[in-house]
Amino acid sequence: MSEKYVAISWNRQKKIYDALLWSGVAVYLLLFIGLGSFLQPNATIETLIIRGFGTCAILLLHIVLIIGPLCRISPKFLPLLYNRRHLGVTTFLIGAVHAVFSIIQFHALGTINPIVSILVSNTKFNSIADFPFQILGLIALIILFLMAVTSHDFWLNNLTAPIWKTLHTLVYVAYALLIGHVALGVLQSETSPILAILLGIGLVLVVGLHLISAFKETDLDKEIVSVDEFVEACTVAEIPEKRACIRTISGERVAIFKYDGKISAVSNVCQHQNGPLGEGKIGDDGCITCPWHGFQYLPETGASPPPFTEKVPTFNVKIEDGKVFVKAKPNKAGTRVEPAKI
Amino acid sequence: MIWAEIIVYSVFVYLAIGVLFALWFVVFGITKLDDSAKGTSIGFRFLIFFGAIPFWFLLAKRLLKGEKRPTEQNAHRRRAEK
Ligand code: HEM
Ligand code: FES
């Protein structure tokens, strides 16, 4: 957590994640280039590298984009989210190899600067069949670059959250640009329609999963309002042991935890990257562990155990007739609250 | 053609300044901005180097204003402060 930064805080789970990721990438590239040189003996190795790395990058980008909604639909997918930033950085690196080879192949031989060449060698902006699709790829690559270089927690803290969030929302702009890049690029080369069909399936999957998860979340976000100081949130019985029930109170989600015969409520929003604390568990150490990257908080205080310094707001709670009532006004982050006894 | 050259070369100049700034920043400036960066490894600073190139302007602005890392706000934190 935020005691002192490290380059990458490796653990077993991350090592397995990266090993699978990189071997998957290696197998894909070897198969693509190996099979390609059999099936298309006329294609040069440069062309195969350009196509192999390009398709690999767009495939990875699809995985990056569907992990978020998948986790909201079912917590079973949370392990995928755990190290998503390495997936993002890998997507950029693979996309960059594709771009560098394309630039060498198509833009490095002339007298003008290769990047200038991408922008000026084709200016048929009003043509669909001959659209300068490489400019779309260039802008998308710049976005992926900016996201990759700011994926360390240091940047979330020091770029300030609004800028960091805007930047990372641009991934959808990059995705749209790349759909254009690939679709228009395929129109111009004589590759088979398979890629275009796969791209269409991918697009339906990405948009569909986002819609489903957004729909699922609307219920959770219905705010409970009440004229009383305390609002009725849920019943004791409906909260699973060592887990939470999530309700929206005072404009944001609250996580109401049940553990060892007690009830405590904290703001649902993890101080790290706004992960959903209410989807985490209380472990043997008595801490709530955020399901996204493992930051921990004590349910009674909303504070991370020392030496860590993260804190989230807490809520006063009381139980009447097996129902949990939560005080609408949150306490300052890290304020100790006596848990309600069941 | 001339517009493309102006854009591309301006970006190159901006990034060249960024490289110089980033070298200074990861060695010295970073600890002035964020206490958690004190005593951190070369590996960490190497990773930050690349981000400091495009974002040098923002980092320089925050350093000049003497700003420290902020805590993100949300509805609960704002209401709790009232
Ligand atoms: C400066 C940036 C870029 C340039 C100059 C560029 C250039 C090209 C070129 C020339 C092609 C046609 C290749 C061919 O059909 O032989 C192509 C296709 C493609 N590009 Fe890019 N690209 C860039 C960025 C990207 C990025 C960032 C991605 C993905 C993340 C990407 C994904 C693809 C894909 C999937 C194809 C289709 C491959 C195929 O034709 O089989 N490109 N690009
Ligand atoms: S959001 Fe990263 S640990 Fe909670």
Image: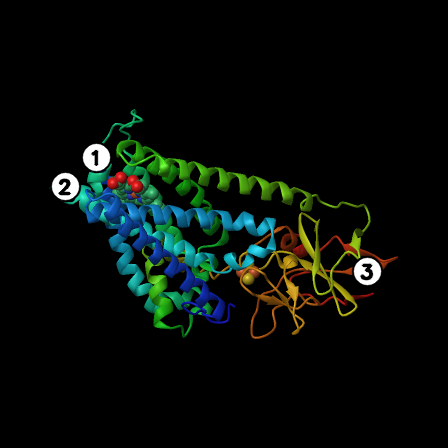
Where residue A196 sits: x, y (%)? 37, 36
State how far apart marks 1 and 2 are (Cα).
Answer: 10 Å
Q: Are marks 2 and 3 in contact (CB under 8 Å)?
A: no
Residue type of the residue flagged with mark 2: Ile
| Chain ID, mark 3 | A
| Left or right: A81, with A178 as reference point | right
Say how many tags the image has.
3
Residue at x-position 42% and y-position 72%: B38
Q: Residues within 10 Å of mark 2 (few under 14, many from 20)?
A: few
> Would residue B37 be seen by someone viewing this image from the given angle?
yes
Q: Are marks 1 and 2 in contact (CB under 8 Å)?
A: yes
Residue at x-position 58% and y-position 53%: B73
| Left or right: A191, with A76 as reference point | left
Which residue is disc 2 drawn over? A112
The image quarter containing residue A192 is: top left
| Chain ID, mark 2 | A
Which residue is disc 3 drawn over? A318
Which residue is disc 1 drawn over? A120
Residue at x-position 50% and y-position 47%: A66
Residue at x-position 35% and y-position 69%: B43
State how far apart marks 1 and 3 are (Cα).
Answer: 68 Å
| Chain ID, mark 1 | A
Where residue A248 sits: x, y (%)? 70, 49
Image position of B59 with respect to A335: above or below: above
Mark found first going from the N terminus, 1 or 2: 2
